[in-house]
Image (cartoon, rainbow, N blue to C red):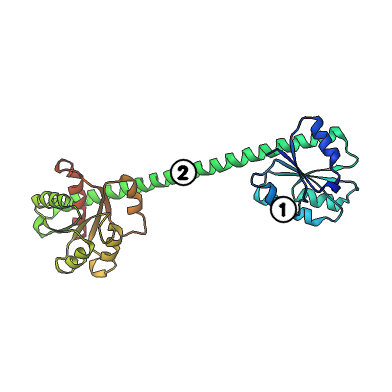
C-alpha cells in the first residue's frame, strides 16, 4: 500500500494534489469513494496508510466523525483536507482539535502542498515508531514488574523460612520429651517410587508415615489417621495439590495440618505459594535419597504446628 491515499469520487476534483505528488515522485493510491463511505474502509484499510487526503466542505461534520474513527483505531494516520472555501475559525479549531494534520486551500500552492504531505508522512511514521516502542516498553516493564514482585516474594519467603528454622531449632533444643514417632506424616503421590522413598527417608528419622496415591484417599485418611504433616505432589489424578490443600484446611478441624506441596518445576513455586492458596510450603521434588535433606528439614518445620 502507498503512504498516501487520495479519497473522493472523480467529481471531487483532486487532480491538482495528484499532479503535485506525481511531480515529486510520491506514490499514492486513488480511491473513488468519500472518506465517510463504508466502502472506503472496506477497500482501503486492510493496512492503514500514513496520510489520507480528502475534500472538506464547510459544515461537513461527517468527515470529522470519519477522521475520529480512523484515528481512534490508528492514531498514527494523518488526515489532510482540501477546501475551496475559507473555513471559519471554529471549523478550523474543530478539525485540528480532532486530529487533522493540515488544511490545503485551493488554488493549490505546490510548494506548500508538497511540504505539508512530506511532513504528514514523516509525522505518521514517527508516531507509528513511537507506538511500537511504547508497546515494547510496556511489555518490558510488565516483565520487570513481575520479576521484581517474584524477587520480593522470594525474599519474604526466605525470611519466613529463617524465622521458622530458628523456632524449630529452639523447639528441638528445649523440648526434652519430644518423640518423633508421635508425628504423623501423610505422603500423597501418584508415583510409587516417590511414596516409597518418602516413607523410607522420613520413617528412618522416626516419624510415623503413611501414604496414598489419590486426593480422595487423602481426605479419607485425614479423618482416620489425623496427620500432622501432609506432603503432596502438585499433580494428582483426581485434583491438584493446591485444591487438595484447600479441601483439607477448609475444615477447621484440620487447620493445624502443615501442608507441603512438591513439584519438579521451580517456575510453579510462585503459583503454589501465592496468597490465595493454603499451602504452607513448597519443595522441589527430590529425585533420590541423596537429595532428601531439603525435604526432611522442611518437613521438620511442621513440628511447630503440633
Q: Are marks 1 and 2 in contact (CB under 8 Å)?
A: no
Compared to residue 70, the image places residue 23 above or below, namely above
Percent from the top left, x then y, of residue 135?
56, 43
Q: Nearer the viewer, residue 241 or 50?
A: 50
Q: Residue at x 25, y 48 (%)?
A: 283
Compared to residue 280, the image places residue 122 above or below, namely above
Q: Residues within 10 Å of mark 2 (few under 14, many from 20)?
A: few
Which residue is label 2 attached to?
A: 143
Percent from the top left, x then y, of residue 37?
75, 54
Q: Residue at x 18, y 42 (%)?
A: 291
Q: Residues within 10 Å of mark 1 (few under 14, many from 20)?
A: few
* Dot 2: element: helix
Measured in 3D between alpha carbons, the distance from the residue under mark 1 to the one under mark 2, in whole angstroms, is 42 Å
Q: Residue at x 9, y 57 (%)?
A: 181
**Residue 179 at least partly seen:** no
Q: Is residue 217 left or right of residue 70?
A: left
Compared to residue 128, the image places residue 38 above or below, namely below
Quarter of image, res 147: top left
* Dot 1: element: helix
Percent from the top left, x then y, of residue 6?
77, 43
Quarter of image, res 294: top left
Mark in front: 1 vs 2: 1
Which residue is label 1 attached to?
A: 39
Q: Residue at x 36, y 54 (%)?
A: 274
Dot label at residue 190: none
Going from N to C along the chain, the mark reached first, 1 or 2, is 1
Q: Is residue 302 left or right of residue 25?
A: left
Amino acid at each position: 500500500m502507498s503512504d498516501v491515499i487520495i479519497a473522493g469520487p472523480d467529481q471531487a476534483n483532486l487532480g491538482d494534489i495528484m499532479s503535485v505528488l506525481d511531480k515529486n515522485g510520491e506514490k499514492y493510491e486513488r480511491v473513488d469513494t468519500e472518506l465517510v463511505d463504508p466502502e472506503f474502509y472496506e477497500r482501503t484499510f486492510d493496512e492503514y496508510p500514513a496520510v489520507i487526503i480528502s475534500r472538506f466542505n464547510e459544515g461537513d461534520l461527517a468527515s470529522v466523525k470519519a477522521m475520529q474513527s480512523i484515528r481512534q483505531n490508528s492514531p498514527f494516520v494523518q488526515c489532510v483536507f482540501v477546501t475551496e472555501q475559507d473555513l471559519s475559525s471554529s471549523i478550523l479549531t474543530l478539525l485540528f482539535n480532532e486530529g487533522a494534520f493540515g488544511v490545503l486551500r485551493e488554488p493549490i500552492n505546490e510548494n506548500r502542498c508538497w511540504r505539508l504531505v512530506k511532513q504528514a508522512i514523516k509525522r505518521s511514521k514517527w508516531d507509528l515508531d513511537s507506538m511500537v516502542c511504547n508497546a515494547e516498553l510496556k511489555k518490558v516493564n510488565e516483565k520487570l514488574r513481575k520479576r521484581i514482585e517474584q524477587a520480593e516474594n522470594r525474599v519474604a519467603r526466605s525470611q519466613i523460612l529463617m524465622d521458622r528454622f530458628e523456632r524449630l531449632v529452639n523447639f528441638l533444643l528445649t523440648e526434652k520429651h519430644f518423640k518423633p514417632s508421635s508425628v504423623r506424616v501423610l505422603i500423597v503421590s501418584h508415583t510409587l517410587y516417590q511414596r516409597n522413598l518418602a516413607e523410607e527417608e522420613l520413617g528412618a528419622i522416626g516419624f510415623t508415615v503413611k501414604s496414598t496415591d489419590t486426593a480422595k484417599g487423602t481426605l479419607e485418611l485425614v479423618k482416620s489417621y489425623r496427620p500432622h504433616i501432609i506432603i503432596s505432589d502438585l499433580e494428582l489424578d483426581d485434583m491438584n495439590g493446591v485444591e487438595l490443600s484447600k479441601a483439607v484446611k477448609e475444615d477447621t478441624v484440620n487447620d493445624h495440618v502443615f501442608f507441603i506441596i512438591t513439584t519438579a518445576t521451580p517456575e510453579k513455586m510462585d503459583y503454589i505459594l501465592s496468597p490465595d492458596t493454603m499451602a504452607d510450603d513448597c519443595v522441589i521434588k527430590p529425585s533420590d535419597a541423596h537429595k532428601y535433606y531439603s525435604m526432611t528439614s522442611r518437613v521438620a518445620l511442621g513440628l511447630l504446628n503440633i
